[in-house]
Structure formats: C-alpha cells, structure tokens
Image (cartoon, rainbow, N blue to C red):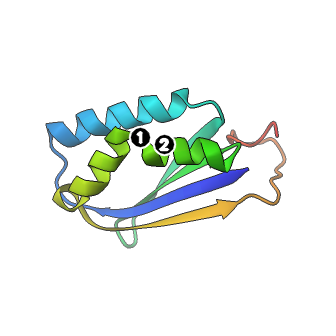
Amino acid sequence: MFTSTFTFAKRAFDDEFHALDQRIAEMARAIPGYLGEEVWENTANGLFSNVYYWETMEALQTLMKHPDHLDAKRQQARWLQGYHIVIAEVVGSHGDGGIPHPLAQR
C-alpha cells in the first residue's frame, strides 16, 4: 500500500478551483485501488494536508497522469502559496478500532 500526502498553504480558492478539485476527487475515488483519504489542518501554521491511501503504485500513478490532475498542477500557483508532496509505502497500520480510518480493515 502507498500514501500520497499533499501539504499546502492556501491562497484564495475560486469557482474554477472548486470545480476542478471536485472532478479530481471524484475521479480519484473511482480508480481501482483507491482506499480512502484524510484531510488535516494545522491551525498553528495554517497548512493543510490531504493524505490519500492507495493499494498499488499503479493506482496512484493513474491519478498523477490524469489530465485534470495535470491541469491542477499547471495552475497551482493561482490557488496555493506553496506545496509539498510525499509518496510513501505503508509498512504497517494498526489501531484499537476506536476511530474510523481508511486502512482500519486492512
């Protein structure tokens, strides 16, 4: 399994951003191998993080190569002050079942 963590600082989001973001989210969720996602905000520094979980690297690459995702990358400076992406392989996942998590049943 793999994660892609997208951490960013916002600028202003407009209608075009929201429409593109919605299309990408719907497309990502439809990719075989998509396992789920989490969204986090760090109120201390104003950064946001979206963590996406993938069964395979091929599933993640399907998202990365999609035309809407490539369009968002080209236009990111309109909506973001900066960003950083981390791709990682999941070597384990466990919990007590007390909170929902995309990998809880894996």
Q: Picture coordinates of residue 22 (x, y %)?
A: 34, 33
Find numbered disc 2 in the image and state the secondary structure of the residue it sits on.
helix
Q: Residue at x 71, y 42 (%)?
A: 55
Q: CA distance from mark 1 to mark 2?
A: 5 Å
1 and 2 marks in contact (CB < 8 Å)? yes
Judge from the rendering whether residue 32 lies leftward or rightward of residue 83; answer left or right.
right
**100 or 6: nearer the viewer:** 6
Determine if residue 3 is in view: yes
Quadrant location of the C terminus in the rendered image:
top right
Residue 29: give x, y in percent of width and height. Answer: 53, 31
The crowding category of the residue bearing disc 1, from other C-alpha atoms within 10 Å (few below 14, some 14 to 19, many at least 20), is few
According to the picture, the residue beneath numbered tag 2 turns out to be 63
Q: Nearer the viewer, residue 50 or 74?
A: 74
User: Going 69% across and 39% down the picture, which residue do you hit?
Assistant: 100
Q: Check disc 2: other Cα within 10 Å, few if <14, some if 14-19, many if 20+.
A: many
Q: Amino acid at mark 2?
A: Leu
Judge left or right: residue 70 versus residue 54: left
Q: Residue at x 68, y 40 (%)?
A: 102
Q: Is residue 26 above or below residue 5?
A: above
| The disc label shown at residue 48, or none | none
Q: Which quadrant holds residue 104? A: top right
Whether residue 84 sits left or right of residue 97 in the image: it is left
The reply to whether residue 42 is visible in this rendering is no
Can you give x and y, in whole percent of width and height, for residue 74 in the image?
A: 25, 56
How many marks the image carries: the answer is: 2
Left/right placement of residue 39 relative to residue 19 reads right
**On screen, 37 above or below 8?**
above
- The residue indicated by pointer 1 is 66
